């Protein structure tokens, strides 16, 4: 007997038939004797409809900006998950399975006061655990909790993943299964490299890099939370037949396990190749090389909510001037340039240059900590294909390389092959 | 300065433009210096959509009846009002009016445990009143409260009227305005009698008879509650221009005031003519005239949830046998006949007869308490038009007459004219 948290996203509960299918997945685990909590998102499209209403409220003549109260936004947008939770509870009951829905405030899932992007502070799972112990399935509305102001607070888009992992930690679940429209985490995007393989296991740290770099399977915060609480998290498909062979396997169900690196016995050097499109690079030429200059550049950018990445600093020949180069998302280029021009006096640079249409390709693997030469292999392979490298940053478990956009697919496939990730 | 509760139904909040229009009605009262609470229904069609999902959940092969848990039904169906409440709060804020939404469990509105048709037990309005005192509009999700099981409980269809009156009682409001798609209560259905007049005032007792007899403006329970707590309740239109002259009149806004009879100075003898179509009559011939026979007939019908009305008992010539005649809704006839056949041995009647396609026309007025001859005028007027009377029941403030269906409109117009209700 195990305790399992199962999470189903919007496409998995898009209509009554799919909700019924979800109920079959739950039934399989219940009949295997497990204690089960299920976390659900809103039916696909519903959250967008609700958000659209909030954003399209007619404005009064002479009214201020399209302001709206984040607390009201939360009260409105969180309603979609309540519907799915109730419907799934009914679907389970109609199969003869004891089940009840839980709204965030009923458990309660306590959050901070950051409406619209709240963080979970505490989950009092006592009553839920007691009922799960009697065989009752807990169906929990994802994406939401109860703020200190006694009002509904939402966790931000994709927040149901975070709900699921937080509940798994609170009820000390043996496993948290994230059911989604893909069947696991791949070595790279299979649409670019058909030889991409589904990973059996991936370490939390690796998944964090994969998720934040564009392999958008899980919300980044849910992975952070899983890492902190060591929640063994499975990514698996909700569209497979719930009763297919192996689907109920406790240790090795089909999918990818995200877990502590200690649990990965045969660690590969490189686990996956991620990429992020639409990067732009900004260079400040001949910046005075003095203490505080980095703060003068990046402080104003941070205040303008511009997400800066891949910072590279070159020392100029005479040691008094430096070049500072970094990337920002393409959509933020114009804003960043304005912010920097405004800060020119404080920073003291010569000219600004920028370039758009770039791609960041990243090689990720915990194994590279203990292996030398991983970066050199990448540079050699890209050079052989004639791909020019515009910037490089490295960390303990990641090498990121900035290249021209048109070479993105070629670079991904080249690196995938170099590190032996291709399907046999 | 007054304290006002305003209630808007589904058609009044059907889309963003109408919600904006509702906000203008609220703004008018706020700017007049009143403390305001607003109760809203779900956007028109939303509740039906949610109910449809509950009812159309796919059934498992071999599953039991289309059972569903009323607690889950409530959790799902109550979500529609949460959305409207949040949207109206945002619309008000965008007009520069302080407002916040309240969900049933936040106030809380405490109900009993009868999920799907719960009754309000208690409203702790303290925090809401305090905030209204600071000028903040309380926007309350109608139709719902918090059951003793700490779960959402709904009040049954049309329950937002009841929410509004209960909140008006709890906050000791000076007035409860029910905004709807008609502009008041009429002396009879204007589609049948174009000379029908809008009433300035109607007593609670009269409105109860009007509502339960088919003038479906307000939920019957909300009128009962208003009567018990003496809540002055206005029925008025949400489709009039919010800023038209007189709309903000504190004492005499356009619409119909439902109030204590003491407040109606010049009481007419008859206030209105109501009708109910699709009635059926059942007669049990030669029933043994002994104690307990009524219980033997009507007990089984009540257990079968058949709503019996207009019971007439005639004593037969020799005093040992009686005829028992009563009406039921047309849809219940077959079920009623089966129940009665099954009870034949206990009851001991000779034959059952029944007739369908009947109409009950009712003359309503508190003034008839102190006026003789009201019933006689009705009988005479109907006789002059050749309308045959099949049954009569009377109470202190109502005369109900059962006639053949095709005469319904003629009877309504005849009685409307006889009691001087026609528009001048």
Image (cartoon, coloured by chain):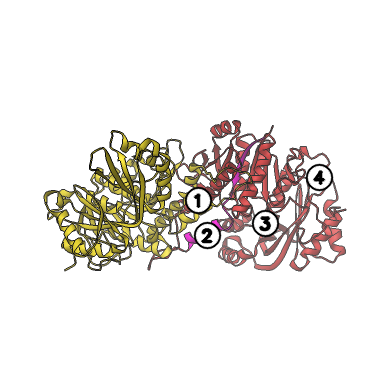
Chain colours: A yellow, B red
Among numbered discs 2 and 4, the one appearing first in the sequence: 2
Q: CA distance from mark 1 to mark 4?
A: 44 Å
Q: Are marks 1 and 3 on the same chain?
A: yes
The chain letter for the residue carrying disc 4 is B
Identify the element where label 3 is drawn.
strand
Q: CA distance from mark 3 to mark 4?
A: 24 Å
Q: CA distance from mark 1 to mark 3?
A: 36 Å
Q: Is residue B95 visible?
A: yes
Q: Earlier in the sequence, mark 3 or mark 2?
A: 2
Q: CA–CA distance between discs 1 and 2? A: 11 Å
| Mark 1 or 4, nearer chain start | 1
Residue under circle 3? Answer: B309
State which quadrant residue A380 falls in: bottom left
Q: Which residue is mark 1?
A: B79
* Residue with the mark numbered 2: B49
Task: From the image, state whether disc 1 or disc 4 is nearer to you.
Answer: 1
- Counting residues from the start of the chain, the first of labels 3 and 4 encountered is 3
Q: Nearer the viewer, mark 3 or mark 2?
A: 2
**Magenta segment: does it hold B18?**
no
Residue at the disc numbered 4: B367
Span of residues in magenta: B34-55
Comparing labels 1 and 3, the label whose residue is closer to the camera: 1
Query: Which element carries disc 1, helix, strand or loop?
Result: helix
Residue A156 position within the rendered picture, expressed as x and y whole percent measured from the top left: 40, 47
């Amino acid at each position: 007997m195990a305790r399992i948290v199962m999470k189903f996203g919007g496409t998995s509960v898009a209509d009554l038939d799919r909700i019924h299918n979800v109920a079959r997945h739950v039934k399989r685990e219940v009949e295997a004797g497990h204690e089960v909590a299920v976390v659900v998102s809103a039916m696909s499209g519903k959250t967008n409809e609700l958000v659209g209403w909030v954003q399209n409220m007619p404005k009064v003549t002479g009214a201020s900006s399209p302001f709206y109260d984040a607390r009201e936004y939360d009260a409105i947008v969180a309603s979609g998950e309540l519907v799915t939770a109730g419907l799934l509870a009914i679907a389970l009951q109609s199969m003869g399975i004891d089940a009840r829905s839980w709204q965030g405030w009923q458990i309660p899932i306590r959050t901070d006061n950051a409406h619209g992007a709240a963080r979970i502070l505490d989950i009092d799972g006592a009553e839920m655990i007691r009922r799960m112990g009697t065989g009752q399935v807990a169906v929990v509305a994802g994406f939401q909790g109860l703020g200190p102001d006694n009002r509904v607070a939402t966790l931000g888009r994709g927040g149901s993943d975070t709900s699921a992992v937080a509940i798994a930690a609170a009820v000390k679940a043996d496993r948290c299964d994230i059911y989604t429209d893909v069947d696991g985490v791949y070595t790279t995007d299979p649409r670019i490299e058909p030889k991409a393989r589904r990973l059996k296991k991936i370490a939390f740290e690796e998944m964090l890099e994969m998720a934040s770099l564009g392999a958008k399977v899980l919300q980044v915060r849910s992975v952070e939370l899983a890492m902190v609480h060591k929640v063994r998290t499975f990514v698996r498909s909700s569209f497979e037949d719930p009763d297919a062979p192996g689907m109920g396997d406790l240790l090795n169900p089909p999918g990818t396990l995200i877990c502590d690196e200690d649990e990965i016995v045969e660690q590969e050097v490189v686990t996956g190749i991620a990429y992020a499109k639409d990067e732009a690079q900004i260079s400040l030429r001949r910046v005075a090389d003095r203490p505080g200059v980095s703060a003068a550049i990046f402080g104003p950018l941070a205040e303008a909510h511009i997400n800066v990445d891949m910072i590279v600093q070159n020392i100029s020949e005479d040691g008094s001037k430096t070049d500072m180069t970094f990337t920002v998302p393409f959509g933020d280029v114009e804003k960043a340039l304005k912010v920097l021009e405004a800060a020119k006096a404080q920073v003291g640079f010569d000219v600004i240059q920028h370039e758009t249409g770039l791609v960041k390709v990243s090689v990720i693997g915990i194994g590279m900590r203990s292996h030398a030469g991983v970066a050199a292999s990448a540079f050699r392979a890209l050079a052989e294909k004639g791909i020019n490298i515009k910037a490089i940053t490295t960390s303990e478990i990641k090498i990121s390389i900035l290249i021209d956009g048109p070479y993105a697919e070629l670079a991904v496939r080249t690196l995938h092959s170099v590190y032996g990730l291709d399907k046999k």
